[in-house]
Image (cartoon, rainbow, N blue to C red):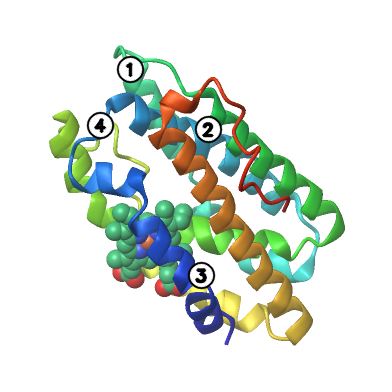
Amino acid sequence: MIMQRLRAETSTWHTTLETTPFSIELLSRTMPLSTYVGQLIAYRIILDALEAVLARSADPTVTAVWQPDLAKVPLLDQDLEFFDTLPVGSMPTPAIRAAQRFATAINRHAATDPVSSLGFLYVMEGSTMGAMQLTAHIRAAFGLTQDHGVAYYSCGDRQRWTAFAHRMNDAVVDEPRQQQVLTAANNAYQAIAETLAALAQPDRSDHPAGNSGTVEI
Ligand code: HEM
């Protein structure tokens, strides 16, 4: 089943991202607020492209999986609106560029191999499951109360995830489609890794991100 394969065949990426400097800063509550807000801005760029592609797709495999309850842009907007009122510093431009490269790839794949968008979606939706465990660290690090500033991070929902997994397993059955989705998921992890690396190292902002270690997806 595709969901089992996705977990198994991307697990190395997940381990890498759990131990990346961005995640270490987050878990140790030492992350600057500008890095956290920078991630929300970068994810908004990515999810704006992805959700638009998924919502307008006519591909039957995609329409069998996508549902409007998976949309996260409104939650990111809610958080960004909250932080707008705070002096959060400037967004490191390499992270914006990394997010934009991913958004461009999402749009390009939508035209040529629409099923790929489901691999991108798997990574972004799955990340909200782990993010639930991180919300307490974010609240503590920045002194946040209630849902202020953590609407996106706290949006993980086991029922929504289980329903998504069932739709994926029912829709993505044949080997060529499974392979497309697996490749896209690995590419999504790579793109997120680049984005988070750029966020955690703002001192590199004078150097264009991706001259080394960037893979065209
Ligand atoms: C400190 C960093 C992270 C931690 C501690 C973490 C933790 C977790 C945990 C505990 C789960 C299982 C959730 C559950 O099923 O209840 C999970 C799932 C997942 N996470 Fe993360 N995560 C982190 C970062 C990320 C990042 C950056 C991404 C990619 C954007 C990501 C993508 C995923 C995906 C796709 C799943 C679903 C795996 C599956 O069941 O197929 N995670 N994460």
Distance from label 2 to label 4 (Cα)?
Answer: 24 Å
Q: Residue at x 29, y 32 (%)?
A: 149
Amino acid at pointer 2: Ala
Q: Residue at x 25, y 31 (%)?
A: 148
Sequence-first tag of 3 and 2:
2
Sequence-first tag of 1 and 3:
1
Distance from label 3 to label 4 (Cα)?
Answer: 27 Å
Q: For mark 4, what is the residue?
A: 148
Q: Nearer the viewer, mark 2 or mark 4?
A: 2
| Along the line of sight, the residue nearer the viewer: 164 or 95 | 95
- The answer to whether mark 2 and mark 1 are in CB contact below 8 A is no
Q: For mark 3, what is the residue?
A: 164
Which x, y percent locates residue 190?
Answer: 57, 55
Amino acid at pointer 4: His
Q: Nearer the viewer, mark 4 or mark 1?
A: 1
Which x, y percent locates residue 124?
Answer: 50, 55
Q: For mark 1, what is the residue?
A: 88
Q: Residue at x 54, y 64 (%)?
A: 122
Is 173 rendered above or below residue 35? below
Q: For mark 2, what is the residue?
A: 95
Amino acid at pointer 1: Val
Sequence-first tag of 4 and 1:
1
Horizontally, residue 4 falls left or right of residue 141, namely right
Amino acid at pointer 3: Phe
Q: Nearer the viewer, mark 1 or mark 3?
A: 1
